[in-house]
């Protein structure tokens, strides 16, 4: 199936027929690792109020919107680690393209991706700094939680700072706590479990 590519994504790099999101880790050769975000790219989007898919600025006009793709865990902890997206097109494309959201995958891959083994050997590629994370190991083989699309007024956007691994004032994502969404809808094409419903309540 060929996905409709919005005009905003016309100049984005492609791989396997899909747009490579701006935040995705990639080798110097351009080969991308879908599902793995590059910390520096993600931070640039979070601080610069840039779309995580196309890398362009989010709306700054009065009444403008931005979108977040959220799991219940994000809502509970009060922030999204994923950068915001353009609500009108980039978010819709991401939902249609991502197998975790479009129903093609019900579980995370059984074996976590080995980023250290994926280093390419190019001394100018920053993949030599890629390391495996506990988060990837914990998710291996686990059911993929339902995702929700939430839209917000652009005036509400603010980065979320917190502590991580003993460090204070770490940029963690986009704030959710104390921010009222304009709309929220389930995008994962499946029935919610009792645990999903309990978490939502």
Image: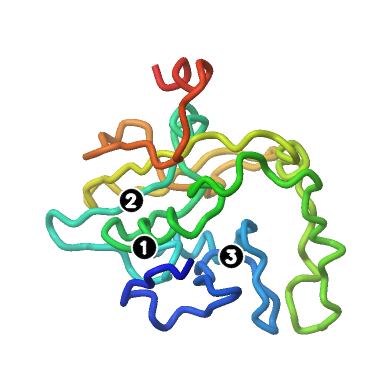
**Do the residues bearing badges 1 and 3 touch, measured as CB atoms within 8 Å?**
no
Query: x, y (%) of residue 145?
Result: 55, 34
Quadrant of the drawing holding the C terminus: top left
Local crowd size for mark 3, using a 10 Å CA cut-off: few (<14), some (14–19), many (≥20): some
**Label whose residue precedes the other's in the sequence (1 or 2):** 2
Q: Secondary structure at mark 3?
A: strand
**Residue 113 occupies which quadrant of the picture?**
bottom right
Q: Which residue is pictured at 76% across the width and 63% down the height?
A: 130
Q: How many marks?
A: 3
Mark in the foreground, 1 or 3: 1
Q: Are marks 1 and 2 in contact (CB under 8 Å)?
A: yes
Which residue is rendered at x = 32% and y = 60% of the image? 86
Rendered position, 55 above or below 13: above
Q: What residue sits right under mark 3 in the picture?
A: 24
Secondary structure under tag 2 reads strand
Would you name the residue on which mark 1 appears?
A: 90
Residue beneath disc 2: 67
Q: Residue at x 36, y 43 (%)?
A: 149
Q: Is residue 177 left or right of residue 129?
A: left
Using the rendered view, name the quadrant where residue 30 is placed: bottom right
């Amino acid at each position: 199936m060929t996905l409709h590519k919005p005009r905003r994504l016309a100049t984005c790099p492609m791989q396997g027929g899909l747009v490579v999101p701006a935040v995705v880790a990639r080798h110097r050769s351009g080969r991308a690792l879908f599902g793995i975000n590059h910390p520096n790219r993600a931070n640039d989007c979070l601080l610069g109020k840039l779309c995580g898919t196309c890398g362009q600025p989010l709306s700054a006009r009065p009444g403008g919107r931005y979108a977040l793709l959220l799991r219940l865990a994000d809502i509970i902890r009060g922030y999204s680690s994923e950068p915001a997206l353009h609500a009108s097109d980039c978010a819709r494309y991401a939902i249609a393209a991502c197998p975790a959201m479009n129903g093609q995958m019900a579980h995370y891959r059984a074996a976590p991706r080995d980023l250290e083994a994926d280093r390419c050997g190019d001394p100018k590629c920053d993949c030599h700094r890629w390391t495996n994370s506990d988060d990837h190991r914990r998710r291996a083989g686990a059911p993929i939680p339902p995702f929700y699309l939430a839209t917000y007024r652009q005036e509400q956007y603010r980065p979320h700072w917190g502590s991580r691994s003993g460090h204070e004032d770490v940029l963690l994502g986009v704030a959710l706590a104390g921010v009222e969404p304009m709309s929220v809808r389930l995008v994962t094409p499946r029935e919610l479990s009792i645990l999903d419903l309990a978490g939502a309540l």
